[in-house]
Structure formats: C-alpha cells, structure tokens
Amino acid sequence: MPGCFDALSAKLVAAAGFKVTFMSGFAVSAARLGMPDTGLISFGEMLDSVRGCAAAAGAVPLIGDGDTGYGNALNVQRTVVEYARAGAAAVMIEDQVSPKKCGHTRGKQVISRAEARMKIRAAAAVKADADILVMARTDARAVDGFDAALARCRDFEEAGADIIFLEAPESEDEMARFCQTMSKPCMANMVPGGKTPILPPARLEAIGYKLALYPVMLLSAAVAAMQATLAALKPGAGAPMPPAVSFAELQSVVGFPDYWQREEHYKADP
C-alpha cells in the first residue's frame, strides 16, 4: 500500500495496479506545507487533500490519515463523515495528544486509554451511515510499552474498529504477537530508518498482517529526483541529469490524450 500525498501520486499508484492506497499525513504535510508532520496541517487542508487524492485514485480504495480526529469525540465523528463524503474508503484515527507527532519520531504522547476507546467508539457509531471503514491506531508502544499498546488495540476491536494499527513495534516478535492477538485485520507500517523492522511482504503476510503501508517511499523518491535535477541544472555544476519521463510521456500521465479525445467529441458544429 504505497503512500500518496496529492492527486498525481494517487493517480500513479492506481495506474501501477495497486489494490489500495493510503494518504499519508507525513507526506501531505511535506508536499503541501513543506513542514513536518507535527500537527501543523489543519483538518480543512487534509480534507481537501483527501478529496483530490480519492478522485485521482478512481476505483482504487483510499485510506485517509485522520490524525487525532481534530478534537474530541464529536470532532472525530465529523472527520469520519467528511472523509467519507470526500471519497475515502477508510479513515485512520489515532490516540496521540494533539498536536500529534510522526509515529517514528520523538516526543509522542498519548491520551488516556478511556478517551482513546471513546474516540474509536464515536467513530464506529457513524461509520455505517457514512459508508466508510475505521482504522484505529495506537502510539502507546513508545510511551507506555508494548503490552499497554496491545491492550488499547483490544479496546479498539471491542469499540468497533475495522482495521487495527499498532504503530512502531520494535521487533519481529512484537509484530507477530500483535497479529496473533487481534481478530480484525492488522496493518504494518514500513518506514526505512524507523523503529519497526523492515520485512518483506511475504514475511509480513506470514506473520498475519493484511496491509503493509509504505508511507513515504514515493515522497522520498520524488525528493531525491528533484534534488538531483536541481543540482544538474545549476550553471557549471557538471552533474548528470537524472532519468526523467519525456514530455510526451508526462502529457500522457496527466491525461492530455484522453482530454483531446473527449474535446473532439464535444466540438460544436461550425
């Protein structure tokens, strides 16, 4: 499940044949604001990004990062409903204190177990009418330890979450214990350089995961390509120009040929 961050990246994920994509808050914050994933981006900005990504992904289901739900239980319900209206197939709600932090960086804090359970219960109460799934995430592993995080995951199942996400387990044993404990589908978050071991998809599946998220790989690749291109464009730099699609290919990716075809169909008679 590659992480997208704008309409173009979502369109590319769909065109590559993936069955699902995830709109990453880290990546959206970086691409939209040029700022870190530390709660600086607003609900309105994230909702607008969901709308663009979901439309570009087409029939490919999109899971939207709903962060902390942007407030209390009633804010969570609004987030769930509005993400559904924007086209998301599922929304992720986490238990961090607001403003939240990226799951694999320092300084995280979590709300109480009771409040976390209440937020997921609130999300579950509106999901059916909104026609959306709820992914429940806990960041308690970094704050209170693995067993406390696992207890929260059990709470989330009981509260009605459809997918469970224990963020940043620190060993393959913890990953396996998590999947063995849950009855709902579990998601793994693969962040190179993060706290969780990077395992091949086949191993993740064998452990028991149903979803494997790669949230920043497209963003990281795009940054590397842009940096290399900028270095090559500097006068006198002598750096080689990195690989790039042709202008004709670029036109095809963004949809010019389809547009021209439809344009001909709707031309007015002279």
Image: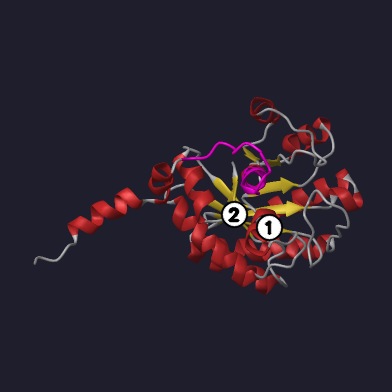
Please name the amino acid that badge 2 sits on.
Phe
The magenta region covers 222-245
Instruction: Evaluate whether residue 131 shows in this view.
Output: no
The front one of 74 and 243 is 243
The front one of 17 and 256 is 256
Counting from the top left corner in percent of width and height, residue 181 is at 75, 38
Counting from the top left corner in percent of width and height, residue 220 is at 67, 44
Mark on residue 82? Answer: none
Residue 38 included in the magenta stretch of the image: no
Q: Is residue 249 above or below residue 102?
A: above
Pick whichever of labels 2 and 1 is earlier in the sequence.
Answer: 2
Q: Quadrant of the C terminus?
A: bottom left
Counting from the top left corner in percent of width and height, residue 75 is at 66, 73
Label 2 residue SS: loop
Residue marked by disc 1: 30
Please name the amino acid that badge 1 sits on.
Ala
Q: Are marks 2 and 1 in contact (CB under 8 Å)?
A: yes
Residue marked by disc 2: 5
Residue at the (87%, 49%) spot, across then down: 142
Residue at the (50%, 63%) spot, across then down: 51
Question: In the shown orientation, is residue 101 left or right of residue 204?
Answer: right
Q: Is residue 236 above or below residue 72?
A: above
The front one of 211 and 133 is 211
Residue 243 included in the magenta stretch of the image: yes
Q: Residues within 10 Å of mark 2 (few under 14, many from 20)?
A: many
